[in-house]
Image (cartoon, grey):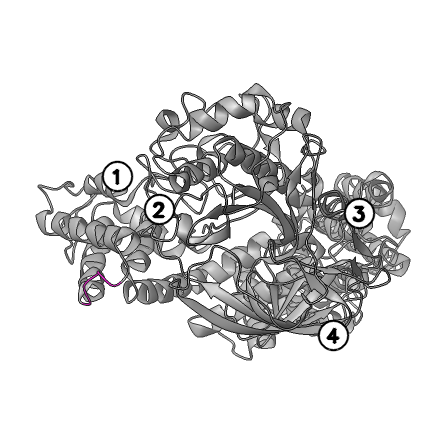
Amino acid sequence: MSTGSITDRRGPFGPHLLFGVVAVLTAWAALIAWGGFVDDPGSYLRPLAVLGALLALSGALLRWSGIPRWLTALAQLALTTLFVSQHITGSLLPVGGTAGELWQALETSVRTSRRYAAPIGDQVPPVWPLLVVAGAAVLVLVEILACTLRRVPAAGLALLAAYALPSGVLDDGPDAASFVGAAAGFIVLLHLDSRDHLLRWGRSVGPDQDTLWRGNPLREAMRAGAGRIGVTATALALLVPAVLPTVGVDLLDLGTGSGNGDIRIRKPVADMRRDLERGEDVPLVEVLTDDPAPSYLRISVLNRYTGDEWSSGDRDVARDDRADGQVPLPRGLSDEVPRTTYDYDVSISEDLDSTWLPTQYPVSAIDAPGDWRFDPATMDFLAADGGLDTRGISYTMKSLSLDFGTDRAFFRNSGAGDTSEEVRRLPTTVPPIVRNLAREVSAGGTTDYERALLLQRWFRQDGGFTYDLRQAPKGTGNQTLAGFLARDGRVGYCEQFASAMAVMARVLGIPSRVAVGFLQPDPVGKRRWVYSSHDLHAWPELYFEGSGWVRFEPTPAGRVEDVPPYTRVAVAGGSDDPRGGPTAASSATSGGTGTAGPSAGPNRRPEIERDTGSTTSADEGGLPLPLLIGGGALLLLLVAGIAALGGPSAVRARERRTRLAGTPDDVWREVRATAVDLGLAWPAGRSPREAGAFLLDHLAVPTDRPAERPRTGAEAAPEAADALERLVLAVERSRYARPGSVATLERTSATEDGALVVAALQAGVTPRARRRARWIPLSVWRR
């Protein structure tokens, strides 16, 4: 009896089911190759096996029923989305709060995969949601391509991308059984596909010839034109991994190293560069704290600059200055500075071998085992016992969070006797370019504090600098510094940025030093945070009467996204944008050098943000083009399905409600997000008043039935223009006014004005732009 063509919708059901089963088994076999990423591969393989069975059965039924191919593909995509949502969140529909929960699960998985090396165990937040989502994308893509669209060779390319990922990332490569299973299944798919094409021309002759397995499957596959392409893809799966270099960041953000090996800190700056270049991200310090947002954890302070390097210099460590109780406040800190105390329980891993004790700055008390002592001038803690280090120890401390405000009250110029000569001294060999740029960049400042703000802003925004660990010069001496500051340089990492700002501050007579420690921890549980080797960082500390030693952050947003709150103060026509965009005073402030970055340097920021997507941090490494293309193809359908079901739209609506009910700054962020969603080119790095002037031309009168081409501008929408003016004023007051001077009713007014401005911006674009903003809100992905 003839079995019939698989694509003959009036034929038997069996061939349709057989094709679907072979397709999902082939894709599932390819996904076994990802088992090296986790200790328990079943955490993602078991649910994907269930999903594969559902896809095979439902796909066969849909194709057998004869409905259009596009509708079959859409139904399979919807089924995959519902299954993933149910398995991860317990709810079928990924809308509203469920969409937020799903997104949060994926963010947690990504953080875990970046922090811990493969294989990732169950002692840390799970990574299986990321593998389930990516694996589901592979399954549904292969099923749709091979069975519904009948593009088996294209499905082979998807299998190749899934297999090539662990081949280029895991040290031991993928399981050989995975490749054998996937390759065998792919050959069977080619056989079934080529046979089906032949049967369209008629029934085979002979009583024993008309079977599904007639002839040699490999020979039939090679005879078919599409088969040649598919077999070539299979061969490439064997050849590509042999020449594919291992990369530091992979398609799914999964760890690449073994996670073992000590991080030694004896000579802090040199050791930090070495440990950052290791590639693997090793957890080093875990803290349990009531601090809602712990950040900089300081290890050591470097006071002495010789022209060749930074070092700790002379230290005054008395026998009584031990880390066993209360410690004095730092010198120069006014008693009037508001402060909040947070408790820290610190545990150091066996991988951190340091003779300096990681602490918050400042602390009011600390209790650490062993003979740890502090230098009253720097308030960093070092081992007094030659055999003492940080490996495996635990201790407690009380951290002080200081609120300096933005009214400059605690940032007065220091006197000659306030600090030691060592933190002011400069060698005579400092290159002229360093001295000249320090004076040019800070020319608009009238106090040491304003000059320091201008230096920070120049490094982060106006000077054309790029953060890139791989291209950064080695060292912090005069020769490196001159090349780093030159017009054709300006590429470096935190070591060069911290050193350059500290040296330039000393040129201006501001006491300065370089601190080394950790930048930002990752949450791993309730009140628990982990600092890892990739969080190692360096920053400058400057001294002012009233505040004492305070940190500044010259490293650009490619590495550090935010700056200390007390440095967001308007000076010389602009203020520090924490995102690192250029300011309105770029050229004037820097004496003609503000935009003198490399003519073709990487990651140069334009003055206007456009809808071109975001760039990754230069220190995070890059992806080979085949992996990038393959990964995009694997996830495209699933992402499109979630978008079609309203996931991002629901997230965006929740964000809007939260922001409009918040502070004037929150409302202003919602106005910016609305502009981004609508495709308006928001002016990056400009003040609220300058941005408001730009928005004024895009306002229209909100109506129930907006026009196709609405009239826009202040005259067309006077009420919205007035609301925008009030909102800009409220934002300026919240940012720059003296604490406590902003009216209590301002938040309510900002909420109402913000809602009107948002509605007016939506009314000022075409219906097509509004629909795109609703279903594809770019601000959800662009922060």
Q: Which label number is shown at residue 569?
A: 2
User: Residue at left 83%, top 52%?
Assistant: 187
The residue that mark 3 highlights is: 168
Which residue lies at the image location 25% right of the left edge and 45% below the top edge? 766
Identity, as a three-letter code, of the amino acid under mark 1: Glu
Is residue 257 visible to us here? Answer: no
Under mark 3, the amino acid is Gly
Magenta residues?
A: 740-744
Callout 3: SS: helix
Q: CA distance from mark 2 to mark 1?
A: 16 Å
Q: Which of the image's four quarters has the N terminus?
A: bottom right
Using the image, tell me which numbered label, if any, was put on residue 690: 1
Given contact means CB atoms under 8 Å apart, are the residues at marks 3 and 4 in contact?
no
Residue type at the position of mark 2: Val
- Residue tagged by mark 4? 122
Q: Which quadrant of the view contains residue 443?
A: top left
Q: Position of residue 569 (x, y in %)?
A: 35, 46
